[in-house]
Image (cartoon, helix red, strand yellow):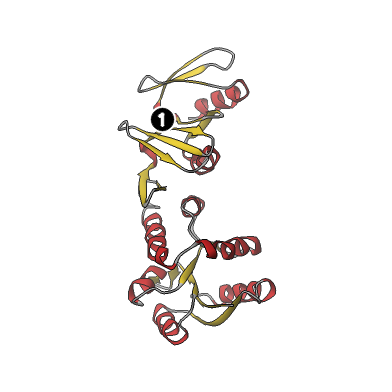
Amino acid sequence: MIRAIIVDDEQHCIDRLNNLLANNHASEIHIAGAAQTVKDGIRLIKDQNPELIFLDVQIHDRTGFDLLRECGDVNFKVIFTTAYDKFAIQAIKFSAIGYLLKPIDEDDLKEAIAKLNHTSITDTKAMAAVIEHNRNTQSKKKKITIPSGNELIFLDIDEIVRCHSDINYTTIFKSDKQKIVVAKTLKEFEELLTEHNFFRVHNSELINLAYIKSYNKGKGGSVILNDGTELEVSTRRKDDFLKRMAEY
C-alpha cells in the first residue's frame, strides 16, 4: 500500500481525487492527508513521510515547485495536477511526466498510477524542472522537451525544419543543420506539432510549413525546402496539403 498525500488549493479537487482513489485504487493507495497551502504541505510531508504526493502546480500565489524546493530532500514520488492549456499538457506528456489534467479523469488517474513503477524518486526534481520550464514558456516562444540519452533538450519549435520517421525512432532536422534522434514515433510528433503549422506530407515525413520554398506538381507532387531538400507528397495527402498551404 502506497502512503500518499494531496496538496491542492481547491477543496473540490481534493474531494474528487479522494473519491476516485477510494472507488478505484483503495487497495493500492492510502491518502494520509491533504493540504491547501505550500506551508501546510511541507508540514504534512514532515508529519506523514509520504511515498507519493499528488501535487497541484498552482497553489494560491505559489507553486508546487516552491514546495519541492523548500521541503528539503525529496524522498517521494510526485504526480502533478494541473489546469494547463493543451500545448503544455502535450509537452509534459511527451516528456513522460506524471500529471493529471483537471478536472481529473478516471482513466488518466489509472494511467498515472500505472507509471509509478517506472518512475524513480530521483526523477522527481527533473520532472518539476521540465514542467516549470513549459509553464514559464507558455507566453513566450513555444518549445518542446526532447528526451535524449541522459539529458532533456528544450527545443524551439521554429528551429525544427522536419521530422523523419524510422519505425520507432524519429530524426529531427534543425535549421542549424544539427540532427537529433529520439526514441519516439513520428505519430507522436505529429500530434504534438500539427497545431504549430507542421504537416505530414508522407508516412515518413513531417515538415514545418515555414521552411517550404516551392511545390512541384505531379500525381502527389513534391516539396522543395529552403535547404534544397526535396520530399515526396503522398497522393492521398496532396489535397489536404494544398489546402493547408493555402490557409497558411
Hey, which quadrant is residue 131 in on the image?
Answer: bottom left
Q: Quadrant of the N terminus?
A: bottom right
Q: Position of residue 28 (x, y in %)?
A: 62, 74
Q: Position of residue 60 (x, y in %)?
A: 43, 73
Q: Residue at x 53, y 16 (%)?
A: 221
Does residue 40 sit above or below 65 in this rendering?
Answer: below
Q: Residue at x 40, y 27 (%)?
A: 211
Residue 173 placement, left or right of 54: left
Q: Position of residue 95 (x, y in %)?
A: 46, 52
Q: Residue at x 51, y 32 (%)?
A: 199
For the residue carrying disc 1, how many other residues have a C-alpha within 10 Å: few (<14), some (14-19), or many (20+)? some
Q: Secondary structure at mark 1?
A: helix
Does residue 99 sit above or below 222 in this rendering?
Answer: below
- Amino acid type indicated by mark 1: Ala
- Residue placed farthest to the top in the image? 218
Pick the residue in front: 51 or 236.
51
Q: Position of residue 200 (x, y in %)?
A: 53, 31
- Residue placed farthest to the bottom in the image? 47
Q: Number of callouts in the render? A: 1
- Residue placed farthest to the right in the image? 23
Pick the residue in front: 115 or 194.
115
* Residue named by callout 1: 210
